[in-house]
Amino acid sequence: MSLVVFPFKEEDPEVLLASVKVALAHPRVKEVLCVGASEDHCFRAVSAAAPELTRTYGKPVGIIVQERIGEMRPGKGDGMNTGLKYFLEETDHRRLHFYDADIVSFSEEWITKAEEAADEGYQVVRHYFPRSSTDAMITWMITRTGFALLWPRSALPWIEQPLGGELLLTREAAEKLFADPRVRRQSDWGIDTLYTFAMVAHGLSIAEIYIDAGKLHKLYGALTDLKTMLIECFSAVQGLKGEAVPEGTMHHIEYPGPVRQEMKERIGYDFERTLWLLRENWTDRQVELLALFPREVREGLLTSRQYPRFSFMDEDAWAEVYRVLLAHFDARDADWAELLFKLWIARVLQYTTAVALRGYDYAMYHLHRMVARYVHRALVGA
Ligand code: GDX
Ligand code: MG
């Protein structure tokens, strides 16, 4: 009845193959497809193992290289859309699951819970997880902030993890998404934003299910590793800013469970290495572009060329910065890309020291309230 797709790029084949086996062992899963970015070492290892897995489980295990479907950088978006296309054109399964290929905590429960919510009639099921208070900084500061400021009456700001790559689509949901040219175009990291946006834009019913065990996967060091993702995720929101979204989406969020101490204590990124990113790669043009921003932001960031400063970038300053970025940011311009990166770093550092430092429960409550305050600001003015 269901197809499971794993998009992957240069992953540890042992981790991916373990997840493939979990999927194959599930009674609801009839087929597994791995979609590689290229014929890398992981692709070769999974290709070598696939025939034996197909024999053992009596279910097809496919492995293909992603097609060029979109128009942006060829990345995860082409991978996911290749899976979507395969599901619609090559199979008649009723449901499609997507899971990242680098998850070491993947289990049968992820598939079962998603299938159960789909059995209840939801057209889309999204997994969400406990996360550390300093993780998910693109989600909170870029995606949820943007969704709140741009579509405050829709379900978008309230989706727990709008960038999550773990989800179930019914066939009708998959058809709607793949028929939408905005989704097909988004071949890069912006794909998660586009899938989430399109689910709400097309009025699909959404259930968010909570996976208590959490998503344990590859982690990043300094925030530099996230630069491309940041730029592509912001551009995805910016590219949608004029689009209309309906208000009345059916949306249910499973109440989360207690978060383990280990997760509460986890630090999402390397603070010291990140601090110094504020000083690097300045150009005269970036200084010029800063003229578009409020005075405290401009002056604060300029001082960072000598000494890292970020306390100016509070929640209100960030809302103003975000609006300037929506109006002026140009992803093709390397100076804009670098400036967005620095502005976001200042925001993340300010949040870390002023909010996250006060403890996990305080921080998570604050982040949810922040989204609500942005919604309020967008609806009734600042
Ligand atoms: N086919 C294909 N092609 N797969 C890719 C590509 C690509 O070009 N790039 C990455 N992937 C796969 C990767 O192997 C993994 O399975 C998945 O996509 C996610 O990539 P990963 O490097 O693990 O990213 P990360 O930081 O775990 O991000 C995921 O979660 C973020 C979030 O939840 O905040 C990913 O789904 C992001 O899009 C999302 O922003
Ligand atoms: Mg990952």
Image: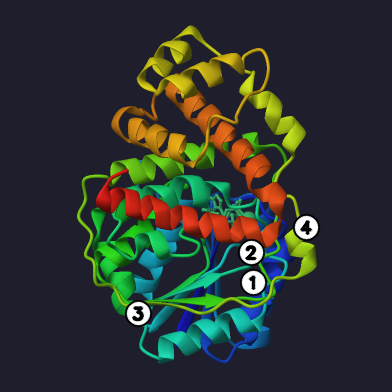
Query: In which image quadrant can residue 307 be found?
Result: top right
- Residue 237 in the image: state x and y as whole percent: 36, 46
Separation (CA) of disc 1 from disc 3: 30 Å
Give the structural element (helix, strand or loop) at label 2. helix
Measured as percent of width and height from the top left, residue 1 is found at: 44, 88
Contact flag, marks 1 and 2 (Cβ < 8 Å) = yes
Residue at 44% from the left image edge and 39% from the top image edge: 316
- Whether residue 192 is visible, yes or no, is no
In the picture, measured across the screen, residue 133 lies left or right of residue 181, that is right
The answer to whether residue 229 is left or right of residue 149 is right
Q: CA distance from mark 2 to mark 4?
A: 39 Å
- Which residue is tagged 1? 50
Residue under pointer 4: 265
Mark 1 nearby-residue class (10 Å; few <14, some 14–19, many ≥20):
some
Q: Secondary structure at mark 3?
A: loop
Q: Which residue is denoted by mark 3 in the rendering?
A: 123
Percent of width and height locating residue 377: 33, 48
> What residue is shown with label 2?
47
Q: Which residue is more in the foreground, 225 or 211?
A: 211
Instruction: Check disc 4: other Cα within 10 Å, few if <14, some if 14-19, many if 20+.
Output: few
User: In this rendering, which labeled residue sits more in front, label 1 or label 4?
Assistant: 4
Q: Cα distance, mark 3 to mark 2?
A: 32 Å
Answer with mark 3 or mark 2, whichever residue precedes in sequence.
2
Are the residues tagged 1 and 3 within 8 Å (C-beta)?
A: no
Colouring scheme, one of rainbow, by chain, secondary structure, one colour: rainbow
